[in-house]
Image (cartoon, helix red, strand yellow):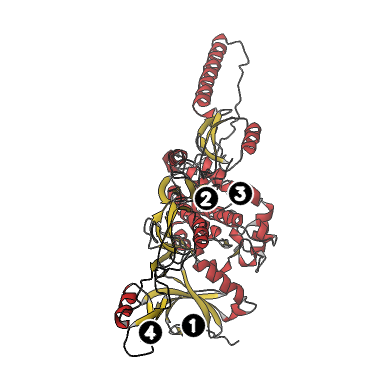
Amino acid sequence: MTTTTGDLTGALVDGRYRLQRLIANGGMASVYEAHDERLDRTVAVKTITASGVAGFDLEAFTHEARTIARLSHPNVVAVFDQGVHEGLPYVVMEYVAGTTLRDLLNRRRRLRIEEAVELCGQILDGLQAAHDAGLVHRDIKPENILLKNGGRGDRVKVVDFGLAEAVHGEGRRGGPLLATAAYVAPELVRGRPASPASDVYSTAILLYELLTGEVPFDGPDPGQVAQRHLAEDVPSPRLIAQDVPEGLAQLVMLAASRDPAARPVDAGAFARRLNAVDARPVAMAAGQPPRPTRAVQTTMVVPQGPNRRSWKALVTLIAIVAVLAAVALAGWWIGVGRYTSAPSLLDQDKSSVVAFAEEHGFEVEFADSAYSESVPKDQVLTQDPGVGERIRSGGTITVVLSLGPERYEVPELAGVDEDEALAALDEFGAEVTVERDYSTEYGKGEVVSTSPPAGDEVKPGAAITVLVSEGPPPLTVPDLVGMDEDEAEEKLEAEGLDVGDVSERYSDTIPEGAVIEHSPAAGDPAAPEDEVDLVISEGPQPIEVPDVVGMNVDDAKALLEDLGFKVKTGQIWFTGTVFDQSKDPGEEIPKGSEIWLWAR
């Protein structure tokens, strides 16, 4: 592919992003302030430079840009778009008007302790959002922390996840070369994959710098600086800034442990410990750090001759000094000496807390455990005294272990009476909605099912829908008219109904043996096993044939037709008198039967 070189100010990227001003320029990338002409907003466009394209993994870049774009957190610079412009990959980000944390440190060298803790907390909040999404930043440093116009609230924005990699995937850019030597985690120097604990280490080094004004390892040779992360433990920031509280200093050293397993597991765990630390500065005399204690050599002069008064005075002086020293020592011991700073036990499990207590000579008591949405089960949730607070040497720290997230299993309630089911759900404060429907399996008032189903774990106060039976569903009587009796009976049995009384009646329209009508009628509601009475047709009603011989043929025909017979005539002469009929007088035949008349 072809690439463009030089300043791209004025270029129109992807037909919508007008590059207006070069903000920053590095060895691998340049950042421009740009105008999104489609959405009429200011954005930042980061382009990989021509020198950075060599060996560039575009597929990985695209994948990570899309992953980062799914992050939505006030402490992470949002990513809006990505693509390739004239051979140069680019990513479009939220434009943050402000400065970098590096600029702030250049002006002030170090921050106030409370301010450093607040800024670091916001950085960790943003990193935790990335860790939850499966991303590791890999290059936390002041240059990658933006401060929004120096304001309050969520002023911190973590930027430049271009070096991030999926936590659970294979490292695509392995090795520490893409990280910054002063902040690089030891495992990256060894070429091992990055993890959330790597970001914890870099953030601890950043916090060290905020508190002291310098990084623990520095020098002109990045390689040598990186090797120091492997070979040396990060010292206490109190060696440089003695106003840093002991608990906070211990947390910095813990988070910057060379062993990743000894650090807080991710940014969230680091943030919880940071929130628990007493961040109040240690009071110093006249604002200056105390001088180190010096050993003072004293020489006693003994007189050469007998001098009883001088000797007594000397003994008296020594006694006074001894008493004063004892009183001072006792006062120091009562007020200060017998106290130390409470260590951090947060996020440790019970066995490690007990082992730590035995090793460091203090007692530990376990109070009732409590639920927590953020601290895993069986790890320390809170401690008293808190991290960095005063505790007597050999004193007792009261620890509360986490029960993990408070969850309750939805009980099996199918077949249980409604009131009993509601009482069971009320034990964990469920917000219950009752719905009702018919059921052939459960009787009226019994629970049919729940949503979520039995066995699912829910939070206290969760919304649960309970379906209660209204009993068997109402039946509708089928239409049986025209069916023969046996067919009608089978139909009723299939519908869950029974045959009731069966009667017969003549019908001119319904064939003999078929249903004329039934009660309840078709479409009427019925309960299971209700009876349906049937009326079965006997066919047309039989009618007695009258004697029409001797009658006028027309009159005879009219009489027979009025009775419901079908009449046909045959005449020999034209007088029109009936002399014979096909059905004998007095014979009973079905209505509608055919009768012939002969006249002459």
Depicted 476 relative to depicted 334: above or below: below
Label 2: state its secondary structure. loop
Q: Amino acid at mark 4?
A: Thr
For the residues carrying marks 3 and 4, which lies nearer the camera in this image?
Answer: 4
Q: Amino acid at mark 3?
A: Arg
Local SS, label 1: loop
Viewer-closest of 579 and 81: 579
Q: Amino acid type of disc 1?
A: Asp
Q: Nearer the viewer, mark 1 or mark 4?
A: 4
Of tags 2 and 1, the one toward the viewer is 2
Q: Quadrant of the N terminus?
A: bottom right
Q: Amino acid at mark 2?
A: Pro
Say the numbered circle drawn on residue 7: 1
Question: Horizontal and vertical percent for residue 243?
Answer: 48, 43
Gap in angstroms between the C-alphas marked 4 and 2 = 82 Å
Q: Mark 1, residues whose alpha carbon is within 10 Å: few (<14), some, or many (≥20)?
A: some
Label 2 belongs to which residue?
A: 453
Q: Which residue is mark 4?
A: 569
Disc 2 crowd rating (10 Å Cα; few below 14, some 14-19, many 20+) is some
Instruction: Name the residue rendered at 52%, 62% in the picture.
Output: 487
For the residues bearing labels 3 and 4, Cβ distance under 8 angstroms: no
**Horizontal and vertical percent for residue 39?**
37, 77
The residue shown at (49%, 42%) is: 277
Q: Position of residue 581 (x, y in %)?
A: 40, 78
Mark 3: which secondary structure?
Answer: loop
Query: In terms of sequence position, does the residue under pointer 2 or pointer 1 come before the other?
Result: 1
Compare marks 3 and 4 and give the one earlier in the sequence: 3
Q: Can residue 479 be seen at all in this image of the molecule?
A: no
Marks 1,4: beta carbons within 8 A: no
Mark 3, residue position: 263
| Mark 3 or 2, closer to the camera | 2
